[in-house]
Image: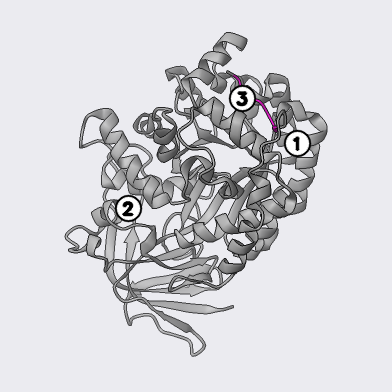
Protein backbone atom coordinates (compact mmCIF):
# COMPACT_ATOMS: atom_id res chain seq x y z
CA UNK A 1 0.00 0.00 0.00
CA UNK A 2 1.09 3.59 -0.67
CA UNK A 3 2.53 5.45 2.31
CA UNK A 4 2.53 9.23 2.59
CA UNK A 5 3.95 11.47 5.28
CA UNK A 6 2.44 14.95 5.65
CA UNK A 7 5.32 16.78 7.33
CA UNK A 8 5.33 19.65 9.79
CA UNK A 9 1.69 20.77 9.73
CA UNK A 10 -0.60 21.93 12.52
CA UNK A 11 -3.42 19.49 13.30
CA UNK A 12 -6.98 20.16 14.49
CA UNK A 13 -7.78 17.65 17.29
CA UNK A 14 -11.08 17.25 19.14
CA UNK A 15 -11.73 16.32 22.79
CA UNK A 16 -11.91 12.57 23.38
CA UNK A 17 -15.70 12.29 23.73
CA UNK A 18 -18.07 13.65 21.05
CA UNK A 19 -20.30 16.49 22.22
CA UNK A 20 -23.61 16.87 20.40
CA UNK A 21 -25.00 19.36 22.89
CA UNK A 22 -23.83 22.84 23.79
CA UNK A 23 -20.79 23.29 25.98
CA UNK A 24 -18.39 21.36 23.75
CA UNK A 25 -14.73 21.71 24.67
CA UNK A 26 -12.62 23.82 22.36
CA UNK A 27 -10.65 21.69 19.90
CA UNK A 28 -6.87 21.73 20.24
CA UNK A 29 -4.55 22.70 17.42
CA UNK A 30 -1.32 20.75 17.82
CA UNK A 31 1.61 22.58 16.24
CA UNK A 32 4.43 21.00 14.25
CA UNK A 33 3.03 17.52 13.60
CA UNK A 34 3.63 14.76 11.08
CA UNK A 35 0.73 12.65 9.78
CA UNK A 36 1.59 9.20 8.43
CA UNK A 37 -0.95 7.80 5.95
CA UNK A 38 -0.77 4.10 5.15
CA UNK A 39 -3.16 3.07 2.39
CA UNK A 40 -6.56 4.55 3.12
CA UNK A 41 -6.02 5.25 6.83
CA UNK A 42 -4.11 7.47 9.19
CA UNK A 43 -1.44 5.35 10.87
CA UNK A 44 0.16 7.91 13.17
CA UNK A 45 0.17 11.58 14.20
CA UNK A 46 3.22 12.72 16.15
CA UNK A 47 5.59 15.68 16.54
CA UNK A 48 7.63 16.35 13.43
CA UNK A 49 10.60 14.06 12.97
CA UNK A 50 9.52 11.38 15.46
CA UNK A 51 7.81 8.90 13.10
CA UNK A 52 10.21 6.32 11.60
CA UNK A 53 9.88 6.26 7.80
CA UNK A 54 10.10 3.34 5.42
CA UNK A 55 12.25 4.10 2.35
CA UNK A 56 9.29 4.15 -0.08
CA UNK A 57 7.30 6.76 1.90
CA UNK A 58 6.32 9.84 -0.11
CA UNK A 59 6.77 13.10 1.80
CA UNK A 60 4.41 16.05 1.43
CA UNK A 61 5.85 19.22 2.95
CA UNK A 62 3.16 21.15 4.82
CA UNK A 63 4.97 23.66 7.01
CA UNK A 64 2.64 26.43 8.18
CA UNK A 65 -0.51 24.61 7.02
CA UNK A 66 -3.41 23.43 9.16
CA UNK A 67 -4.62 19.85 8.71
CA UNK A 68 -8.36 19.40 9.25
CA UNK A 69 -10.76 16.56 8.43
CA UNK A 70 -12.38 16.60 5.02
CA UNK A 71 -15.80 18.20 5.36
CA UNK A 72 -19.03 16.23 4.89
CA UNK A 73 -21.68 17.98 2.79
CA UNK A 74 -24.80 16.43 4.31
CA UNK A 75 -27.38 17.57 1.76
CA UNK A 76 -26.70 18.63 -1.82
CA UNK A 77 -28.03 18.54 -5.35
CA UNK A 78 -24.62 18.54 -6.98
CA UNK A 79 -25.55 18.74 -10.70
CA UNK A 80 -27.73 21.79 -10.00
CA UNK A 81 -24.58 23.83 -10.56
CA UNK A 82 -25.85 23.77 -14.15
CA UNK A 83 -28.56 26.25 -13.07
CA UNK A 84 -26.45 28.51 -10.88
CA UNK A 85 -27.80 32.06 -11.09
CA UNK A 86 -30.84 31.45 -13.32
CA UNK A 87 -33.49 32.20 -10.68
CA UNK A 88 -32.60 35.08 -8.40
CA UNK A 89 -34.73 37.24 -6.09
CA UNK A 90 -37.89 35.16 -6.52
CA UNK A 91 -40.13 33.57 -3.88
CA UNK A 92 -39.87 29.82 -3.30
CA UNK A 93 -42.96 28.61 -5.18
CA UNK A 94 -41.99 30.72 -8.19
CA UNK A 95 -38.41 29.46 -7.93
CA UNK A 96 -39.64 25.85 -8.19
CA UNK A 97 -42.62 26.16 -10.52
CA UNK A 98 -41.43 28.82 -12.96
CA UNK A 99 -37.71 28.11 -13.10
CA UNK A 100 -36.03 25.08 -11.56
CA UNK A 101 -38.51 22.28 -12.16
CA UNK A 102 -39.21 23.40 -15.76
CA UNK A 103 -35.48 23.66 -16.44
CA UNK A 104 -34.70 20.30 -14.86
CA UNK A 105 -37.07 18.70 -17.38
CA UNK A 106 -34.41 19.53 -19.99
CA UNK A 107 -31.74 17.38 -18.34
CA UNK A 108 -30.21 14.37 -20.04
CA UNK A 109 -28.02 11.80 -18.32
CA UNK A 110 -24.94 13.28 -19.97
CA UNK A 111 -25.86 16.77 -18.73
CA UNK A 112 -26.06 15.41 -15.18
CA UNK A 113 -22.68 13.69 -15.56
CA UNK A 114 -20.92 16.93 -16.49
CA UNK A 115 -22.88 18.94 -13.95
CA UNK A 116 -21.81 16.45 -11.29
CA UNK A 117 -18.19 16.74 -12.37
CA UNK A 118 -18.37 20.52 -12.12
CA UNK A 119 -19.91 20.35 -8.65
CA UNK A 120 -17.47 17.70 -7.43
CA UNK A 121 -14.49 19.71 -8.68
CA UNK A 122 -15.80 22.77 -6.84
CA UNK A 123 -16.33 20.79 -3.65
CA UNK A 124 -12.84 19.28 -3.78
CA UNK A 125 -11.38 22.79 -4.12
CA UNK A 126 -13.48 23.72 -1.08
CA UNK A 127 -12.18 20.90 1.11
CA UNK A 128 -15.23 18.64 0.91
CA UNK A 129 -14.47 14.91 0.74
CA UNK A 130 -17.97 13.44 1.27
CA UNK A 131 -21.33 14.50 -0.16
CA UNK A 132 -24.86 13.25 0.47
CA UNK A 133 -26.40 13.96 -2.93
CA UNK A 134 -30.11 13.89 -3.77
CA UNK A 135 -30.79 14.23 -7.49
CA UNK A 136 -31.70 12.47 -10.75
CA UNK A 137 -29.83 10.21 -13.19
CA UNK A 138 -27.74 9.02 -10.30
CA UNK A 139 -25.83 6.40 -12.27
CA UNK A 140 -24.09 9.31 -13.97
CA UNK A 141 -23.47 11.02 -10.63
CA UNK A 142 -21.97 7.77 -9.32
CA UNK A 143 -19.66 7.58 -12.34
CA UNK A 144 -18.52 11.16 -11.67
CA UNK A 145 -17.91 10.35 -8.00
CA UNK A 146 -15.91 7.28 -8.95
CA UNK A 147 -13.66 9.39 -11.17
CA UNK A 148 -13.35 12.33 -8.77
CA UNK A 149 -12.21 10.17 -5.85
CA UNK A 150 -14.44 11.55 -3.09
CA UNK A 151 -17.01 9.70 -0.97
CA UNK A 152 -20.75 9.97 -1.51
CA UNK A 153 -24.10 8.91 -0.16
CA UNK A 154 -26.25 8.93 -3.30
CA UNK A 155 -30.06 9.02 -3.29
CA UNK A 156 -32.09 9.12 -6.52
CA UNK A 157 -34.84 11.70 -5.95
CA UNK A 158 -38.31 10.34 -6.72
CA UNK A 159 -41.75 11.99 -6.59
CA UNK A 160 -45.00 10.30 -5.60
CA UNK A 161 -46.61 10.93 -8.98
CA UNK A 162 -43.86 8.86 -10.63
CA UNK A 163 -45.25 5.78 -8.91
CA UNK A 164 -43.88 2.44 -7.66
CA UNK A 165 -42.25 1.60 -10.99
CA UNK A 166 -39.97 4.63 -10.73
CA UNK A 167 -39.17 3.76 -7.13
CA UNK A 168 -38.08 0.30 -8.23
CA UNK A 169 -35.80 1.84 -10.85
CA UNK A 170 -34.09 3.82 -8.09
CA UNK A 171 -33.72 0.61 -6.08
CA UNK A 172 -31.99 -0.99 -9.06
CA UNK A 173 -29.56 1.93 -8.96
CA UNK A 174 -29.00 1.30 -5.23
CA UNK A 175 -28.15 -2.32 -5.93
CA UNK A 176 -25.83 -1.46 -8.83
CA UNK A 177 -23.75 1.03 -6.88
CA UNK A 178 -23.90 0.05 -3.21
CA UNK A 179 -20.27 -0.12 -2.04
CA UNK A 180 -19.05 1.07 -5.44
CA UNK A 181 -15.90 3.08 -6.16
CA UNK A 182 -13.82 0.88 -3.82
CA UNK A 183 -16.35 1.33 -1.03
CA UNK A 184 -16.56 5.12 -1.32
CA UNK A 185 -20.20 5.08 -2.51
CA UNK A 186 -23.20 4.39 -0.29
CA UNK A 187 -26.69 4.37 -1.82
CA UNK A 188 -30.00 5.22 -0.08
CA UNK A 189 -33.58 5.85 -1.12
CA UNK A 190 -34.56 9.45 -1.93
CA UNK A 191 -38.30 10.23 -1.77
CA UNK A 192 -38.39 13.96 -2.41
CA UNK A 193 -40.50 15.29 0.49
CA UNK A 194 -43.77 14.61 2.30
CA UNK A 195 -45.47 17.37 0.29
CA UNK A 196 -44.55 15.70 -3.03
CA UNK A 197 -44.94 12.04 -2.10
CA UNK A 198 -47.87 11.52 0.28
CA UNK A 199 -48.31 8.93 3.01
CA UNK A 200 -48.97 5.85 0.85
CA UNK A 201 -45.86 6.40 -1.22
CA UNK A 202 -43.82 7.06 1.93
CA UNK A 203 -45.06 3.78 3.42
CA UNK A 204 -43.89 1.99 0.29
CA UNK A 205 -40.49 3.72 0.47
CA UNK A 206 -40.12 2.83 4.14
CA UNK A 207 -41.02 -0.82 3.52
CA UNK A 208 -38.62 -1.16 0.60
CA UNK A 209 -35.84 0.58 2.56
CA UNK A 210 -36.25 -1.93 5.39
CA UNK A 211 -36.29 -4.82 2.94
CA UNK A 212 -33.06 -3.86 1.21
CA UNK A 213 -31.35 -2.49 4.32
CA UNK A 214 -30.77 1.16 3.39
CA UNK A 215 -31.54 4.58 4.79
CA UNK A 216 -33.66 7.42 3.41
CA UNK A 217 -32.63 10.98 2.45
CA UNK A 218 -35.61 13.38 2.30
CA UNK A 219 -36.56 17.06 2.53
CA UNK A 220 -38.56 17.76 5.72
CA UNK A 221 -40.37 20.82 7.10
CA UNK A 222 -38.40 23.29 5.01
CA UNK A 223 -40.90 26.13 5.48
CA UNK A 224 -43.68 27.00 7.90
CA UNK A 225 -46.12 26.84 4.96
CA UNK A 226 -45.18 23.20 4.31
CA UNK A 227 -45.93 22.35 7.94
CA UNK A 228 -49.26 24.19 7.79
CA UNK A 229 -50.18 22.35 4.57
CA UNK A 230 -49.43 19.00 6.19
CA UNK A 231 -51.54 19.87 9.23
CA UNK A 232 -54.40 20.97 6.97
CA UNK A 233 -54.32 17.91 4.70
CA UNK A 234 -53.36 15.15 7.15
CA UNK A 235 -53.73 16.58 10.65
CA UNK A 236 -50.09 15.85 11.47
CA UNK A 237 -46.72 17.51 10.84
CA UNK A 238 -44.28 16.22 8.19
CA UNK A 239 -42.08 14.70 10.91
CA UNK A 240 -45.09 12.93 12.42
CA UNK A 241 -45.97 11.65 8.96
CA UNK A 242 -42.49 10.15 8.63
CA UNK A 243 -43.01 8.44 11.97
CA UNK A 244 -46.45 7.06 11.08
CA UNK A 245 -45.36 5.81 7.65
CA UNK A 246 -42.31 3.99 9.03
CA UNK A 247 -39.67 6.18 7.40
CA UNK A 248 -38.03 6.76 10.78
CA UNK A 249 -37.53 3.02 11.24
CA UNK A 250 -34.38 3.34 9.10
CA UNK A 251 -31.50 5.85 9.26
CA UNK A 252 -32.70 9.13 7.79
CA UNK A 253 -31.14 12.39 6.61
CA UNK A 254 -33.53 15.33 7.07
CA UNK A 255 -32.81 18.03 4.51
CA UNK A 256 -33.29 21.39 6.27
CA UNK A 257 -36.05 20.76 8.89
CA UNK A 258 -36.34 24.41 9.89
CA UNK A 259 -39.75 24.10 11.55
CA UNK A 260 -39.94 21.04 13.79
CA UNK A 261 -42.44 21.34 16.62
CA UNK A 262 -41.45 20.39 20.20
CA UNK A 263 -43.27 17.07 19.63
CA UNK A 264 -41.33 16.60 16.38
CA UNK A 265 -38.05 17.11 18.20
CA UNK A 266 -39.08 14.48 20.76
CA UNK A 267 -39.66 12.05 17.88
CA UNK A 268 -36.38 12.93 16.20
CA UNK A 269 -34.43 12.46 19.42
CA UNK A 270 -35.74 8.89 19.64
CA UNK A 271 -34.95 7.84 16.07
CA UNK A 272 -31.83 7.50 13.89
CA UNK A 273 -32.07 10.77 12.01
CA UNK A 274 -29.70 13.66 11.38
CA UNK A 275 -30.41 17.20 10.18
CA UNK A 276 -28.66 19.10 7.39
CA UNK A 277 -28.33 22.87 7.66
CA UNK A 278 -27.64 25.31 4.79
CA UNK A 279 -28.19 28.77 6.26
CA UNK A 280 -27.12 30.65 3.15
CA UNK A 281 -30.03 29.12 1.25
CA UNK A 282 -32.44 30.00 4.05
CA UNK A 283 -31.28 33.61 4.22
CA UNK A 284 -31.34 34.00 0.46
CA UNK A 285 -34.86 32.56 0.11
CA UNK A 286 -36.26 34.26 3.22
CA UNK A 287 -37.18 30.88 4.70
CA UNK A 288 -36.18 31.45 8.33
CA UNK A 289 -33.62 29.55 10.37
CA UNK A 290 -33.49 26.14 12.00
CA UNK A 291 -33.32 25.53 15.77
CA UNK A 292 -29.75 24.23 15.66
CA UNK A 293 -28.96 24.81 19.33
CA UNK A 294 -32.13 23.04 20.46
CA UNK A 295 -31.54 20.07 18.16
CA UNK A 296 -28.04 19.61 19.51
CA UNK A 297 -29.21 19.95 23.10
CA UNK A 298 -31.49 16.98 22.42
CA UNK A 299 -28.64 14.91 21.00
CA UNK A 300 -29.84 15.11 17.37
CA UNK A 301 -26.89 15.16 14.94
CA UNK A 302 -26.59 18.36 12.89
CA UNK A 303 -24.27 18.79 9.90
CA UNK A 304 -23.52 21.48 7.35
CA UNK A 305 -24.95 21.39 3.84
CA UNK A 306 -24.59 23.35 0.64
CA UNK A 307 -28.02 22.50 -0.79
CA UNK A 308 -27.92 23.12 -4.55
CA UNK A 309 -25.94 25.87 -6.22
CA UNK A 310 -29.16 27.07 -7.89
CA UNK A 311 -30.39 28.26 -4.50
CA UNK A 312 -27.07 28.83 -2.76
CA UNK A 313 -24.71 29.76 -5.63
CA UNK A 314 -21.65 28.09 -4.09
CA UNK A 315 -20.73 24.66 -2.72
CA UNK A 316 -18.73 26.15 0.13
CA UNK A 317 -19.10 24.74 3.64
CA UNK A 318 -16.66 27.21 5.17
CA UNK A 319 -19.17 29.89 4.27
CA UNK A 320 -21.97 27.77 5.76
CA UNK A 321 -19.96 27.18 8.94
CA UNK A 322 -19.47 30.91 9.46
CA UNK A 323 -23.14 31.65 8.73
CA UNK A 324 -24.26 28.93 11.14
CA UNK A 325 -22.36 30.59 13.96
CA UNK A 326 -23.52 34.09 13.07
CA UNK A 327 -27.18 33.31 12.43
CA UNK A 328 -27.56 31.31 15.64
CA UNK A 329 -26.05 34.19 17.63
CA UNK A 330 -28.40 36.58 15.84
CA UNK A 331 -31.41 34.36 16.47
CA UNK A 332 -30.60 34.08 20.18
CA UNK A 333 -29.66 37.77 20.54
CA UNK A 334 -26.65 36.41 22.42
CA UNK A 335 -22.99 36.46 21.37
CA UNK A 336 -22.40 33.41 23.57
CA UNK A 337 -24.67 31.21 21.46
CA UNK A 338 -23.02 28.82 18.97
CA UNK A 339 -19.46 29.05 20.21
CA UNK A 340 -16.37 28.32 18.15
CA UNK A 341 -16.20 24.87 19.73
CA UNK A 342 -19.82 24.10 18.86
CA UNK A 343 -19.65 25.21 15.24
CA UNK A 344 -16.43 23.24 14.67
CA UNK A 345 -18.18 20.19 16.14
CA UNK A 346 -20.99 20.64 13.64
CA UNK A 347 -18.66 21.30 10.71
CA UNK A 348 -16.52 18.20 11.18
CA UNK A 349 -17.87 15.60 13.60
CA UNK A 350 -21.52 16.59 13.09
CA UNK A 351 -21.40 15.94 9.36
CA UNK A 352 -19.92 12.48 9.93
CA UNK A 353 -22.67 11.73 12.46
CA UNK A 354 -25.45 12.76 10.06
CA UNK A 355 -24.23 10.31 7.36
CA UNK A 356 -23.65 7.55 9.94
CA UNK A 357 -19.86 7.56 9.63
CA UNK A 358 -18.86 8.95 13.05
CA UNK A 359 -16.62 5.94 13.74
CA UNK A 360 -14.13 6.64 10.96
CA UNK A 361 -14.71 10.15 9.57
CA UNK A 362 -14.88 13.68 10.98
CA UNK A 363 -11.65 13.58 13.02
CA UNK A 364 -7.93 13.19 12.40
CA UNK A 365 -6.82 10.29 14.57
CA UNK A 366 -4.81 7.10 13.98
CA UNK A 367 -7.02 4.32 12.63
CA UNK A 368 -9.48 6.69 10.96
CA UNK A 369 -9.88 7.23 7.24
CA UNK A 370 -7.29 9.52 5.70
CA UNK A 371 -9.71 12.21 4.51
CA UNK A 372 -7.45 15.19 5.13
CA UNK A 373 -7.47 18.81 4.01
CA UNK A 374 -4.48 21.14 4.30
CA UNK A 375 -5.38 24.80 4.76
CA UNK A 376 -3.03 27.70 4.24
CA UNK A 377 -2.84 29.99 7.28
CA UNK A 378 -0.73 32.77 5.76
CA UNK A 379 -3.42 35.00 4.24
CA UNK A 380 -3.67 38.60 5.36
CA UNK A 381 -7.13 37.94 6.81
CA UNK A 382 -5.76 35.09 8.98
CA UNK A 383 -2.90 37.16 10.37
CA UNK A 384 -2.11 37.30 13.27
CA UNK A 385 -2.93 33.88 14.76
CA UNK A 386 -3.84 34.65 18.35
CA UNK A 387 -6.57 32.00 18.23
CA UNK A 388 -6.10 29.57 15.31
CA UNK A 389 -9.50 27.97 16.02
CA UNK A 390 -11.18 31.38 15.78
CA UNK A 391 -9.35 32.01 12.52
CA UNK A 392 -10.62 28.68 11.21
CA UNK A 393 -14.24 29.70 11.79
CA UNK A 394 -14.16 33.43 11.06
CA UNK A 395 -11.15 34.15 8.83
CA UNK A 396 -10.01 31.16 6.79
CA UNK A 397 -12.10 30.47 3.70
CA UNK A 398 -12.38 27.87 0.97
CA UNK A 399 -9.76 29.70 -1.13
CA UNK A 400 -7.25 28.72 1.56
CA UNK A 401 -7.66 25.02 0.77
CA UNK A 402 -4.30 23.89 -0.60
CA UNK A 403 -4.32 20.08 -0.69
CA UNK A 404 -7.04 17.43 -0.34
CA UNK A 405 -6.82 13.70 0.33
CA UNK A 406 -9.69 11.22 0.42
CA UNK A 407 -9.17 7.59 1.43
CA UNK A 408 -5.45 8.33 1.42
CA UNK A 409 -5.41 9.46 -2.23
CA UNK A 410 -4.39 12.94 -3.31
CA UNK A 411 -7.24 14.65 -5.16
CA UNK A 412 -5.92 18.22 -5.06
CA UNK A 413 -2.29 19.24 -4.58
CA UNK A 414 -1.34 22.88 -4.23
CA UNK A 415 -4.73 23.82 -5.79
CA UNK A 416 -4.16 21.57 -8.82
CA UNK A 417 -6.72 18.84 -9.54
CA UNK A 418 -5.26 15.36 -9.88
CA UNK A 419 -8.44 13.40 -10.75
CA UNK A 420 -10.60 15.81 -12.76
CA UNK A 421 -9.95 17.94 -15.85
CA UNK A 422 -11.30 21.34 -14.81
CA UNK A 423 -10.98 23.00 -18.21
CA UNK A 424 -12.71 20.11 -20.02
CA UNK A 425 -15.52 20.21 -17.45
CA UNK A 426 -16.12 23.94 -17.97
CA UNK A 427 -16.08 23.48 -21.73
CA UNK A 428 -18.64 20.65 -21.60
CA UNK A 429 -20.92 22.56 -19.23
CA UNK A 430 -20.83 25.79 -21.21
CA UNK A 431 -21.73 23.92 -24.41
CA UNK A 432 -25.02 22.81 -22.83
CA UNK A 433 -26.28 26.01 -21.25
CA UNK A 434 -28.31 27.49 -24.12
CA UNK A 435 -30.45 24.35 -24.34
CA UNK A 436 -30.74 23.84 -20.59
CA UNK A 437 -32.20 27.26 -19.83
CA UNK A 438 -35.10 26.98 -22.30
CA UNK A 439 -38.43 26.97 -20.45
CA UNK A 440 -41.03 24.97 -22.37
CA UNK A 441 -44.61 25.98 -21.46
CA UNK A 442 -46.40 23.30 -19.45
CA UNK A 443 -43.32 21.14 -18.94
CA UNK A 444 -41.86 20.65 -15.46
CA UNK A 445 -40.85 17.65 -13.40
CA UNK A 446 -43.19 18.36 -10.45
CA UNK A 447 -45.48 21.01 -8.95
CA UNK A 448 -44.71 22.93 -5.79
CA UNK A 449 -47.95 23.36 -3.80
CA UNK A 450 -49.14 26.91 -3.20
Q: In the figure, 307 relative to 145: above or below?
A: above
SS at circle 1:
helix
**First-in-chain label (3 vs 1):** 1
**Residue 131 image position (x, y, % from top left):** 55, 51
Q: Which mark is residue 211?
A: 1
Horizontal side of 141 relative to 305 (left or right) equals: right
In front of the other: 91 or 270: 91
Q: Quadrant of the C terminus?
A: top right
- Report the magenta residues as a range: 444-449
Indicate whether 54 appears above or below 348: below
Q: How many marks?
A: 3
* Inter-mark Cα distance, 3 to 1: 30 Å
Q: Position of residue 202 (x, y in %)?
A: 69, 26
Residue 24: quadrant of the picture = top left
- How crowded pointer 3 is (Cα within 10 Å; few <14, some 14-19, many 20+) is rated as some
Q: Is residue 446 magenta?
A: yes
Q: On residue 15, which mark appears?
A: 2
Identify the residue at horizontal 42%, vertical 62% (top origin).
365
Query: Please, what is the dominant secondary structure of the magenta stretch?
Result: loop
Residue positioned 57% across, 9% down in the render: 232
Amino acid sequence: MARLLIRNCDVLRFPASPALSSGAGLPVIDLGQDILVDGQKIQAIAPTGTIPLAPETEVLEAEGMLAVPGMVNTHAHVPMVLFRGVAEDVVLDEWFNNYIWPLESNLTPEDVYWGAQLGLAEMIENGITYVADHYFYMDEVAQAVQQAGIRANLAWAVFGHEGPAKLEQTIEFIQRWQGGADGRITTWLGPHAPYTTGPDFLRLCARRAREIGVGIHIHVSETSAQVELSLKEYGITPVQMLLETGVLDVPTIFGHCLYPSPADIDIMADHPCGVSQAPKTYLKAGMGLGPVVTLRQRGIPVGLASDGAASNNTLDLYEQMRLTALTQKHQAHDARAMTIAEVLEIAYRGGAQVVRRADDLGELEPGRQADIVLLRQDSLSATPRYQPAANLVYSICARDVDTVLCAGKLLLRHRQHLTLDKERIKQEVNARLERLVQRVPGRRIAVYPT
